[in-house]
Image: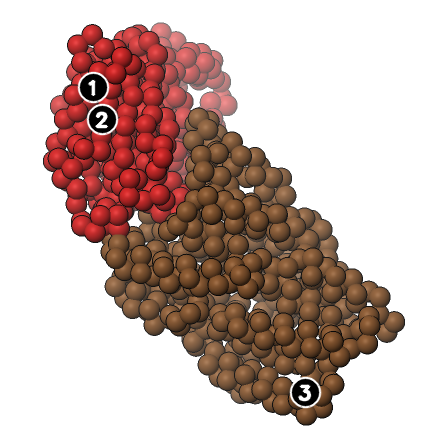
Amino acid sequence: MKPVWRWLVAVLLLAATPAFAHLTPNSAIELDFRSADVLAKIRIPQSEIGYALGKPLLSAAELQTHFRASAPDGRAWSVTIPAPHLDRSQGQADLVTTAILTPPPGAPLRRLSLHYDAIIDRLSSHIVLIFARSDFAGGVLESKPAMIGALRQGATDVSIDRGAGSGWRGFGAALKLGMRHIAEGADHLLFLFTLLLPAPLLAAGGRWRDAAGARTTFRHLVSIITAFTIGHSVTLIGGAFFGWQLPARPVEVGIAVSILISAIHAFRPLFPGKEAFIAAGFGLIHGLAFATVIGNFALEPLAKAQAILGFNLGIELVQVALAALVVPLLLWLARRPVYQGVRMTGAALAGLAALYWIWARI
Amino acid sequence: MIRPPIPRPGPIMPGGAPQTAQEAITQFTKYGDDWQGIADDRGNDPMALETVANARLGVARLTGDYAGYAQAEAALAQAFALSPAGSGPHHSKAGLELALHRLSGADAALAAITRYAVPDAPAQQAEQEAMRGDLRFYRGDNRGAMGRYKLALQLGGGPSSLCRISLLQWRVGETENALRSLEKCEAAPRVRTPQFAASIEMQRGIIELGRGDWPLATKHFAAADRIFPGDWRVSLKRAFMQAAGGDTAGAAKALEALDVPGQRPEVADSLANLYRLTGDGARSRQWADKASAIWKARLAQFPEATWGHARDHELAFGDRRAALAYAQADARNRPHGEALIGLARAWIANDRADLAIAVLDKARASGWRSVELERVSADALALAGRGDAAEAAREAALDMDPRAFDPARGFIWNDH
């Protein structure tokens, strides 16, 4: 899969529970390890409930009898199961609820045993997969949940030891996630660098003409990068904290359009001297895509703030590192006749890539 | 590379060959009965009995009724009893043994042919070479199989060899080559019987289904049904596509129409699966029980031909330990990719992801490439805690088939 699609698909699948290639549908429990409790999102295929029990649904009280958690010393955790609802987001009807598991006083939060036997007590062919979806303190923030184990008839208990946790580990994971996101998300970088292409030049008469001075160019470049950072940071925070969001597809198309406009601008000046505003404006759209990544981890406010900080810092680190490579080259090339060709070729390639992405994402 | 154009396929015979599956069954049955009469009259005619066997085999293939295989086997046994030592219907015997997955029996029959004083006709020699290729294929020697198929082609094997080459190319992940070989296969005969033309469409549909193009697969299955109506295997695929497309009630009706009591456990399993996926436990169990009874009978009668099916039945509706036993027997008998993937599933179901990974590696080492291989690898690797490798396998599956993990795929029973 192409890197850019990897991320689009990853974003779309963030809320998806991995299905098994098993011949029949499986249940899944996704765990979110938080600062004072553990959330357990239980997903049971409705068809398997019908097959096993001869009725379409399971109540919270029934589920309660199948789900237990205990501390290493044997004391029971409190397990609160809200009423389940039907969810069809994964192409089939699933019964879904999110249980809240709270340890007894003094018991470790990151070491517990789970017992679960709904459906598998009746069906030997049914499998329940256990995943760690998010464990901020454990440094786990992945687009795809990590499998902890599988339960089936005769093996209905799993011991979980997440090791020591700290806010720093979560921050580090978010930083890495941000770095990987921007490094693999070619479209974000292409937008920025296409916008930087004409930055060393002055526009006159509807065309890009002479090279600006080094100091002016440098200031110009820094303002574009900074504006992009501000733009995407605003919507990243808004998206993650206040739920600002748009469906993934228009956001992804918007990102491709931003590249196309930058490419046209690199070819012929559309908004000379105002690149920073454009960078900030389109940065808002790019930020919405970033926010989807963080917003799906069901993090608590403090962890979310740390995650946003780390994620954004990761993005900036890669952005600055690449800018440090590209900017001197631009400054050096801009004074040479060959630069017109470089700019035109770069603009054409970026434009073609953008058109392809627009076509592929619509 | 510029490839030579493939000629257009010849016309489909409008007469002179059965136009529907029912017509073919009737003709084969009558042909078999007539030759049985001749054999009975003559009393000692092995060739007449061989013809009976081939006719019964033809009926078995078209109806899914294993009684036909038993009758073919009996006719051949009688023919051998009447033949002088070292001679007899070895060619037909090899074909039957292969159909029943009895590789050593096919080996022995083909070996006997090499000791003939007078060689068989070139067309038969080509088919024998192709059967030697089949033996290599089922033993996991894909390269050796290809060598034999090409040799068969040189000997004048024609469509039969080209179709085998296509199947092998598909199994080693060369989908485009497989489709091209299928096109060549289709163009090889001067005129095509409806049954042959439909089988090409069916195989095209299976290939397209394997790479996630469900609408195109549906079209090919419909074309197969139009060209040679009434083939239950085609109807089964069409019902799967109907269910995967959301019309589960219509698919259930279509599948129930295919049921023949005491036969076609594949249909019973498909119905059990469909009803399970629609949450109707009572009906699902009813059909699973019917399938189970037929598989049990077949396990007693033709175990080699049944192990793979019984494995999948047990994995979904029965006992995972029994599934493992069948999977092991099948993989020992035919250690090719499909059986190894089935064994890996059974190991996973029996909490041995490590052993599943080992057999999947063996399948991969043989050159086998399929969505199913990657899908099951993803499961085994994830259970073994190798998240990154599992993710890579998952992506490989999605690269081959964007719908590799689509829940609707569950309606396509035995899609491997």
Specify the quadrant of the image occupied by residue A222: top left
Q: Position of residue A172 (x, y in %)?
A: 34, 11
Q: Chain of mark 3?
A: B
Residue located beneath label 1 in the image: A76
* Residue under the image location 27 percent in, 28 percent down: A115
For image coordinates 59% across by 42% down, the residue present is: B363
Residue at image location 63% in from the left, 74% down from the top: B74
Residue A19 in the image: x percent, y percent? 35, 40
Q: How is the rendered protein coloured?
A: by chain
Q: Nearer the viewer, residue B388 or B322?
A: B322
Query: Label 3 is placed on what type of residue?
Result: Ala
Q: Which mark is residue B39?
A: 3
Name the spot of residue A70 as percent of width and height, x first.
24, 19
Residue B199 placement, left or right of A141: right
Which label sits on residue A137?
Answer: none
The reply to whether the C-beta atoms of the residues labelled 1 and 2 are less than 8 Å apart is: yes
Name the disc covering residue A68, or none: 2
> Residue A105, position in %: x, y?
17, 10
Q: Nearer the viewer, residue B379 or B87?
A: B87
Q: Are marks 1 and 3 in contact (CB under 8 Å)?
A: no
Structural crowding at the residue carrying mark 2, measured as other residues with C-alpha within 10 Å and reported as few (<14), some (14–19) or many (≥20): some
Q: Chain of mark 1?
A: A
* SS at circle 3: helix
> Which amino acid does the dot numbered 1 rest on?
Ala
Q: Is residue A333 above or below residue B246?
A: above
Note whether residue A237 is visible.
no
User: Gap in Å between the C-alphas at discs 2 and 3?
Assistant: 72 Å
Q: Colour of chain B?
A: brown
**Amino acid on which the number 2 mark rests in the picture:** Arg
Nearest the eye: B109 or A362: B109
